[in-house]
Every structure is written in structure tokens, then in C-alpha cells.
Amino acid sequence: MKNQTGKYIKYAIGEIILVVIGILIALQINNWNENRKNTSKETQFLKNFYADLKANKVELDRVIKKTEFTSKSADSILKLKAGELASLSLMSYVRCMMNATGFTVYQSQEGTIQDILGSGKLDVITNDSLRLAIGSWQAHLKIIREWETIDKKTYNIYSDYLHEHANLYKIGDKRELPIDDLLKNQFMNDKVFLNRLRDRERIPKILNRLYNNEILRLDNLMSQIDAELKK
């Protein structure tokens, strides 16, 4: 009887051990599958994010050229006023005056990053520095957006001045100039015009610097992503 009881206990213990081992193996397999899924999600996210960053660099190149052109156009007239530029023909003056109305915004691709931030699955990114950079994405863009809003205001104020004082209706198929030499001289002695023109030189220049800094940030992010994908 004792032998049978002992055998039963040993059998029961063996069964329990097998069940525990089975549970542990199942948990291990489940964890492995979860890790594999997360790794797959992370890889896909990083690939999509890299593609977005690449597109954003192209877009940044556009706005960098645009803001530089706008700022330099306004600056040419200001240099003429300061005596740093010998002369500007009426045609060149009008060109600079009109080009100073240039306005644009950085149309960034944010689909991938909005998906992961919106889903609350930022922790799928295992690289700490990358996760931090992605988490602070909107903070960096906020500064740019604030200056773009200021740029839009100065653009509107400057454009309103031109609509009120220049003969913009003459610009058309006949290529007539909206101002003559007399009006040009009046503009050059009007501090309201010059102040508004200064804004069109200064704000786009600030944006240009922010856009160039953003290029460097994207380059750094792309390098980190590339290194992570090669692991």
C-alpha cells in the first residue's frame, strides 16, 4: 500500500512538473512571438519614418530657397536706402519689391509619426535616443510654426501696403510696372514702407536659419535610423 501511494505521489509530482514546464515553454514562446511582432512593427515604423524624413528634406530645401530669395529681395532695397548698393533700375526695384511678398510654409510629412504617437505605442522604439527624438518631434516643429505665423502676418501687412500705395492693377499681360520713379522715391522716403520691408527681410531670414537647423536634425535622425535598421 505504501509503495502504491509513493508511486502515485511521484507520478503526481512528475505530472505537475511537466505541466509547469509546459506553461513556462508556452510563456517563453508567447514572449518570443510578442518580441518578434514588436521588432517587426519597429522595423516597419522606422522604414516609413525614414521615408517621411527623406521627403521632408526635399520640402525643406524648397522653403530654404524660398525664404532666402524673399529675404535677399527685401534686403536689396534696404541696402539701396543705406547707400550700400549703388543703384537699382526701376525694373529691378519693382522685382525686388514684389519678390519681398514671398511667403511659404514647411509642409512636413507627419503621417508615420502621428500614427505612433496617436496609438501610444512609442515604447515599440527600443533605441532610447531615437525614442526621445520622436517624442520631442512636435516641440521642434512648434517653434517653426510660430515663426511661420509671424511671417504670415508681416506678409499680409506688407502686401496691404502695396495694394494701398502701388498700382498693382497695372501688372498684367502688358507687363506694365506698378510704380514709376516718382513713386519709387516716395517709397524710399516712407518709413512705414521701409519698416514693413525690414520685416520681410528679417523674418524670412530667421525662418531660413530654423529650416537649415531642421535639415541637420533630420540628417542626425536618418543616420540613427539607418544604423538601427542595420543591426
Image (spheres, helix red, strand yellow):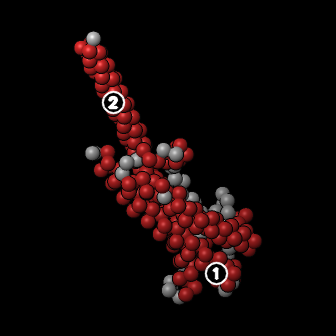
Q: Quadrant of residue 160?
A: bottom right
Q: Position of residue 112 (x, y in %)?
A: 49, 45
Q: Quadrant of residue 188?
A: bottom right
Q: Nearer the viewer, residue 27 or 65?
A: 27
**Marks 1 and 2, how far apart in space?**
77 Å
Q: Is residue 17 above or below residue 113?
A: above
Q: Position of residue 54 (x, y in %)?
A: 41, 50
SS assignment at label 2: helix
Can residue 133 be seen? yes
Q: Is residue 180 above or below residue 63?
A: below
- Residue at position x 26%, y 18% in the image: 6
Q: Which residue is mark 2?
A: 24
118 sits left or right of 175 in the view = left
231 sits left or right of 131 in the view = left
**Which residue is outermost to the bottom?**
83
104 sits left or right of 137 in the view = right
Q: Position of residue 231 (x, y in %)?
A: 27, 45
Q: Which mark is residue 194?
A: 1
Q: Residues within 10 Å of mark 1 (few under 14, many from 20)?
A: some
Q: Position of residue 125 (x, y in %)?
A: 40, 47
**Which residue is outermost to the front?**
1
